[in-house]
Amino acid sequence: MHDLNRRYATKKYDPSKHLAPADWEMILTAGRLSPSSYGYEPWKFILLDQQARQDIQPFAWGAVASAKGADKLIAILVRKDVTYNSPYVQHLVRDIKHKEFSETDPRTLNFKNFQENDLQLKTDQDRYNWASRQAYLALANMLMAAARLDVDSCPIEGFNYAQMNQYLADRGVMDPAHWGVAVMASFGYRDQEITPKVRQPLTDIYEEM
């Protein structure tokens, strides 16, 4: 419970304080080891440099405080092209999971049915939305890992997605045909007191059938 109460959305960071490399690696590892649908890990974590921090401020209002004070500011990208037989899935199956890939394999066909029929994922936008849900699992784990390390953090959705995607494409960070920004996050050390959490009571959000 301490970690849950320790974590909060930091609005003001101390720019003089920096994460130990081992702590940052631990936070990134928490993201890397996060669960994802079918284990297909449709994400990438991009550490924004100082130039990017300056450039994005006109269209990323929610990231301005983080850009000015957080030690780390990242964008989490997700793939828009994860299909049952996409080159990316074939790469994961063969090179990461070290299994044979076949379009007629039961697992492949099951994933095809899951995407196309159960979830009705028909377009790149559909697949981006699905992948973004996976990214939030990674984000949550990174935020909690940070809290465990007494590192402060802030999840960020306050930005213009079209402009952010265009900016990262123009910088050569991503190919917009395959990737899109899902969410951003910052990490560092706060220059403010933790605000006590105010939440709905459990009885309002939990029911038993």
Image: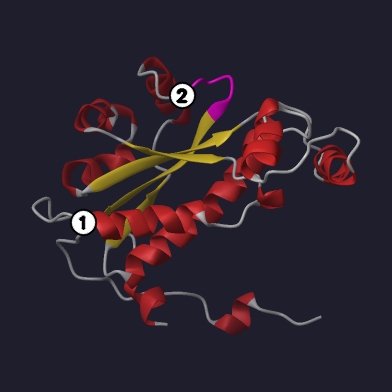
Assess disc 2: are there few (<14), some (14-19) or many (≥20) residues with their C-alpha within 10 Å of its C-alpha. Answer: some
Q: Nearer the viewer, residue 112 or 196?
A: 112
| Residue linked to disc 2 | 174
Helix, strand or loop status at disc 1: loop
Which secondary structure type mostly characterizes the magenta part of the structure? loop
Q: Secondary structure beneath disc 2?
A: loop
* Residue 74 locus on image (x, y percent): 35, 42
Above/below status of 149 relative to 57: below
**Residue found at x 33% / y 29%:** 59
- Closer-to-camera residue (200/89): 89
The residue carrying mark 1 is 19
Give the position of the N terminus as an image quadrant: bottom left
- 47 left or right of 106 in image: left
Q: Which residues are magenta?
A: 174-179
* Residue 207 screen position, x and y as percent: 71, 80
Residue 50: percent from left, percent from top: 20, 32
Disc 1 marks a residue whose amino acid type is Leu
Residue 187 vs 105, above or below: the answer is below
N-term-proximal mark, 2 vs 1 = 1
Residue 96 location, quadrant: top right
The image quarter containing residue 173 is top left
